[in-house]
Image (spheres, grey):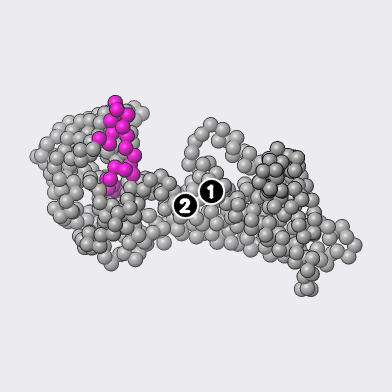
Amino acid sequence: MLRVDIEKKLGEFSLQANFAGEGRVIGLFGASGAGKSSLVNMIAGLLRPDRGTIVIDGETVDDTAAGIHVPTYRRRIGYVFQDARLFPHLSVAQNLDYGRRMNGLAPDPAQHTRVVDLLDIGALLDRRPGKLSGGERQRVALGRALLSRPRLLLLDEPLGALDEARKLEILPYLVRLRDEANVPMVYVSHDAAELRQLATQIVMLKQGRVTSFGGVKVLA
Amino acid sequence: MPEISPAEWTAILLSLRVAIIATLVATPFGIALAWLLARRDFWGKSVLDAIVHLPLVLPPVVTGYLLLLTFGRKGLVGGFLADHLGIVFSFRWTGAALACGVMAFPLLVRPMRLSIEAIDRRLEQAAETLGAAPWKVFFTVTLPLALPGVLAGMVLGFAKAIGEFGATITFVSNIPGETQTISSAIYSLIQTPDGDAAAGRLVIVSIVLALGALIAAEWFARRATARLHGN
């Protein structure tokens, strides 16, 4: 489902990663500065590797030797950022509908209802992002990414900006997402406990290198 | 206030027409240029920036004269447009609109540029991850978020255009009913014996229009801030 073999130099920092994930949730674990976000940005196409290949769901989206670099908007990925990044000029409902409209997909009310129910955001639909709490914002961002019908969902520390109470509020939704939404995920975190609950496979990054790879046991 | 005479109305309506057309035609160019200056780095950017601001610091009579040389009947561009497209600027109200548009351009571009610079680029990245091609990102995220700044630029440009004098009178002269705007009408009236009352009325009209535009621009700027904070 995801194969990564890349090298990238960012100033003094060099990132080198080689792994293939088949699990439902690949946990990308490492301290801040280990290169997790850069790696995810490369999978998303926001950052271009210096050398190597990235394959999503059988499609080569990056291959520096062959000169392939599929732009972000054609990768059919969903990306949930730490800071939600909801569009402030659109209502929650319009935010949720954005990906479907941009991809020219037909409306799918059943899927819409399913996602809205899964994330409990039905009561927020008419609100503006400025009027949401941090946790609500993150749930809407999850819904927005899911409704663009991605083949891979990238979550970059989606709980990172929340306090402990809010984290506990969102975590069950993420578990439900994993078990019900049927979209493979790459979940970035520096929190081992979080990944133990969510991930099915772990890629451990240290100073730009993959130090271990395997089941959740490698976190121990 | 004493009655505004038909001749004064002609000048007021012509000024409005000239300023509205100048603003509307300049706006798409202004948005494109504001985006270019805010978001792109290219060779000669500072030169382009300087050229855009030139009408702000150049004596208006110089700008008018350069327009006459370029867009006059015998000018390089003016001759071509007159011969091939039948568009004539010299001594026409269209020429007044061109002069006003050029003079207003720096004021029109500035708020647009500032509002585009203020947009969080990470929102545009988010739009891209949701499948929006770059031009869709521009029309669904960048432009709506910059809209209050775009409107503020239009209002300021309009206010400048409606008061323009030096470049207009140099380029298209001062022909009542064709190129005589409020400013050039006031200029003629002050030089006419007993013209003071009429000039005074037009002065009041100018002040009202300028104040209205400034208040509108301020209101749009405040809307822009509210919009960026998602309220």
Tell me the residue at 35%/46% (across/down). Answer: B128
- Are there few (<14), some (14-19), or many (20+) residues within 10 Å of tag 1? many
Q: Amino acid at mark 2?
A: Leu
| Viewer-proximal residue among A110 and A189 | A110
Q: Quadrant of the C terminus of chain B?
A: bottom left
Image coords of residue B171 (percent x, y): 76, 47
**Mark 2 secondary-structure assignment:** helix
Q: Amino acid at mark 1?
A: Ile
Q: Quadrant of the N terminus of chain B?
A: bottom right
In the image, is A111 to the left or to the right of B205?
left
Image coords of residue B154 (percent x, y): 59, 55
Chain assignment, label 2: B
Same chain, marks 1 and 2?
yes
Chain assignment, label 1: B
Residue A65 falls within the magenta-colored stretch: yes
Tell me the residue at 16%/51% (across/down). Answer: A182
**Mark 1 secondary-structure assignment:** helix
Q: What residue is pinned by disc 2?
A: B143
| Viewer-proximal residue among A164 and B164 | B164
Query: To which quarter of the image does residue B209 belong?
Result: bottom right
Q: Which residue is at the far right?
A: B193
| Relative vertical location of residue B47 with respect to residue B33 in this rendering, above or below | above
Question: Which stretch is magenta?
Answer: A60-85
Residue A13 visible in the picture: no
Image coords of residue B61 (percent x, y): 76, 44
Tell me the residue at 32%/50% (across/down). Answer: A103
Q: What residue is pinned by disc 1?
A: B31
Mark 1 and mark 2 in contact? Answer it, CB < 8 Å: yes
In the image, is B156 to the left or to the right of A43?
right
